[in-house]
Amino acid sequence: MALTGVAVVAGLAALCLGGCANLGYYWQSASGHLALMNASRPVNEWLADTATPDTLKARLALSQRIRDFAATELHLPDNPSYRRYADLKRRAAVWNVVAAPPYSLTLHTWCFPVTGCVGYRGYFKEADARAEAARLSALGLEASVYGVPAYSTLGWMNWAGGDPLLNTFMHYPEGELARLIFHELAHQVVYAKDDTMFNESFATAVERLGGARWLAAHASDAARAEYAAQRRHPGRREAIACGLDIRMRNVRMRSALRRLIRFEMPAQPRAACIRCAFDDKCRSARSVVQGKKEAGMQQQAQSLRGIGQRLRST
């Protein structure tokens, strides 16, 4: 994902431009990325270090074969990115904050110099992300925080060593590791300002096509079987793709949820109906409006239940 990488680039740019309004945020973006870079070493040094565990050495060697494939077979950028490795001693590279008004599918956006507007804001410390989410909640928005295993600086930091491999994704199954590297490199090829949907769609297309080619040409039978099993039961990375990949792949779900949200009814029963649409144990949406006298309420509730069933079937 480009995700927090655009904020890092924006932070570096803003510090150079001397902006003051969000100086604290820009400083944490720039200093957080520089700390990440300082923690990284060339992969060859890790491989030569006798203290490096054999399991990590094997993964690092695999990552370099994948990186070479990206450049020679997929014609993705051949630059310093993903030739270094860092163990951050934490479970995520950054934590993103997303927010939206209640009963809305339109994300709150933040705008940055150079890179444009995006529907998330990234922090290198989870506590800072949660503080921002609490601030947004106090303003009446619904906010959420999630960890991100990797991000792209869009090639802007290749002069300083590029984007490194990280412990947050190094032990992904082979197919997922390949896809992630291809995805992040794709952001260095094309990045459209103010268009997160396009940027993520492009990178996702590259990772899927590239991942299939890698698995077919270079992976073992065991790696292909592991990948196939992971596809049947999406886990860690599919969930982290968070929102972005999931929303893009579930157009029917978004359409149905918009219809549900747009029903004209009081806020409290509408909220209950929305919860009911996602709850397999909710047998009838009528229960959430029991005793209500508004004309047409019962019929609307039944319609909501039907939408909920379609949502769960997508």
Image: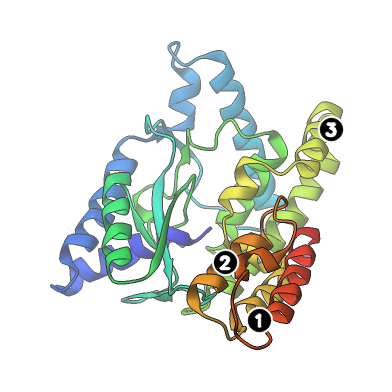
* Callout 1–callout 3 Cβ contact below 8 Å: no
Kindly identify which residue carries mark 2: 189
- When asked about the image quadrant of residue 25, the answer is bottom left
The CA span between labels 1 and 2 is 52 Å
The answer to whether residue 278 is seen in the rendering is yes
The CA span between labels 1 and 3 is 50 Å
Q: Nearer the viewer, residue 229 or 174?
A: 229
Q: How many residues crowd around disc 1 within 10 Å: few (fewer than 14), some, or many (20 or more)?
A: some
Q: How many residues crowd around disc 2 within 10 Å: few (fewer than 14), some, or many (20 or more)?
A: some
Kindly identify which residue carries mark 1: 297
Question: SS class of the residue under badge 3?
Answer: helix
Question: SS class of the residue under badge 2?
Answer: loop
Kind of residue at disc 1: Met
Q: Nearer the viewer, residue 234 or 14?
A: 234
Q: How many residues crowd around disc 3 within 10 Å: few (fewer than 14), some, or many (20 or more)?
A: few
Kind of residue at disc 2: Val
Residue 67 x, y percent position in the rendering: 61, 43
Kindly identify which residue carries mark 3: 225
Q: Earlier in the sequence, mark 3 or mark 2?
A: 2
Q: Earlier in the sequence, mark 1 or mark 2?
A: 2
